[in-house]
Image (tube, rainbow, N blue to C red):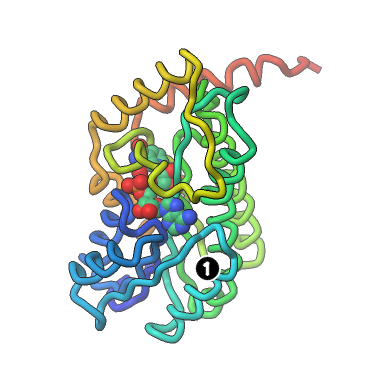
Amino acid sequence: MESLQGKVAVITGATGGLGMALARQCAARGMRLVLADLDAGALERAVAQFGGPERCAGRPTDVTRAEEVEALARFTGERFGAPFLVFNNAGVGVSKTIAETTVNDWRWVLGVNLWGVLHGIAAFLPRMQAGGGRIVNTASAAGFLSEPCMGAYSVSKHAVVVLSETLRRELELERSRVGVTVLCPAFFPTGINQSERNRPAELASPPAASALAQAAKAQLEKAVNHGRLGADDVAARTLEAVEGERFYVFTHPKIRLAIEERMRPILAAFPSR
Ligand SMILES: NC(=O)c1ccc[n+]([C@@H]2O[C@H](COP(=O)([O-])OP(=O)(O)OC[C@H]3O[C@@H](n4cnc5c(N)ncnc54)[C@H](O)[C@@H]3O)[C@@H](O)[C@H]2O)c1
């Protein structure tokens, strides 16, 4: 890939754990940054860390709203020109059984994790086609698994994986100058366990009540907080993959076995002829 120096990166969910780490990786390569997230104050503080208005701009954006992501794309173009990297990274998690997951849970999780990525592609892809670059979608190892009490999250991340795979194939067939990378990490410490802080009041939902979900939530919190890799490790591997024009980014070797275990009964269920 050509040098990233001086090029423009847009990051959604930019003031969160992984978003900030991705911003650090891009800044270290001399990129100019557009940071998008919900909270204007957190964005201001983040912009100050990355050298101020010449190098970095912040734009409050709710990725669930198409018009706000479109406005982010216009803002980016006016401020710095067409982006070369777009990280559709904003995400939230809910830990409930499918039976407990309410319509509001589905709307919120799919709204951020899936529609946020769809809005990002719709707004940025047409603006990137001429100059080329890469769309980097944050999925998760959950995008290949079906763990109990992670239903809404996993459904959203499976969708992001398939969306990314399809987009990649289409762009290749069209010989587009835009590539795709899909990021599939397992647990690492960030604010993801406190996702509820960002839930809009109109999508309120009661907390999980089942013993199964409460146990899963406790386990999930432990897994995230004690993740061996940090957000900076995950972001560094992501940028290496981007520079190497690689599609899948897996960061946690143990997940390979879990994916194999999921695939085994699927493949075994095929008739032999
Ligand atoms: N931390 C992990 O263990 C882990 C593992 C796999 C994948 N991921 C994914 O990484 C991505 C980043 O999450 P993180 O772990 O840094 O968590 P985080 O909570 O630290 O950051 C998420 C960011 O997204 C923002 N956000 C939430 N809703 C938004 C909306 N509607 N519009 C714009 N921004 C919004 C939040 O304000 C926050 O800054 C997510 O897509 C998450 O699913 C995380």
Give residue 150's position: percent from left, percent from top.
50, 28
Bin the neighbour count of mark 1 within 10 Å (Cα to Cα): few under 14, some 14-19, many 20 and up: many
Give residue 56's position: percent from left, percent from top.
28, 75
Quarter of the figure with the C terminus:
top right
Quarter of the figure with the N terminus:
bottom left
Q: Residue visible at 55% across and 25% down?
A: 146
- Provide the secondary structure element on which disc 1 rests: helix
| Most foreground residue, 140 or 36 | 36
Q: Which residue is mark 1?
A: 69
Question: Relative to 8, does residue 145 appear above or below in the rendering?
Answer: above
Q: Residue visible at 29% across and 49% down?
A: 17
| Most foreground residue, 154 or 126 | 154
| Residue 88 seen in the figure | no
Which residue of the protein is positioned furthest toward the right in this rendering?
A: 273
Give residue 67's position: percent from left, percent from top.
58, 70
Left or right of 127: which side holds 194? left
Give residue 25's position: percent from left, percent from top.
25, 59
| Residue 169 seen in the figure | yes
Which residue of the protein is positioned furthest toward the bottom in this rendering?
A: 78
Q: Identify which amino acid the numbered label 1 is placed on.
A: Val
Question: Relative to 73, does residue 236 appear above or below in the rendering?
Answer: above
Q: Residue visible at 55% across and 21% down?
A: 262
Left or right of 135: which side holds 225? left
Q: Residue visible at 20% across and 65% down?
A: 28
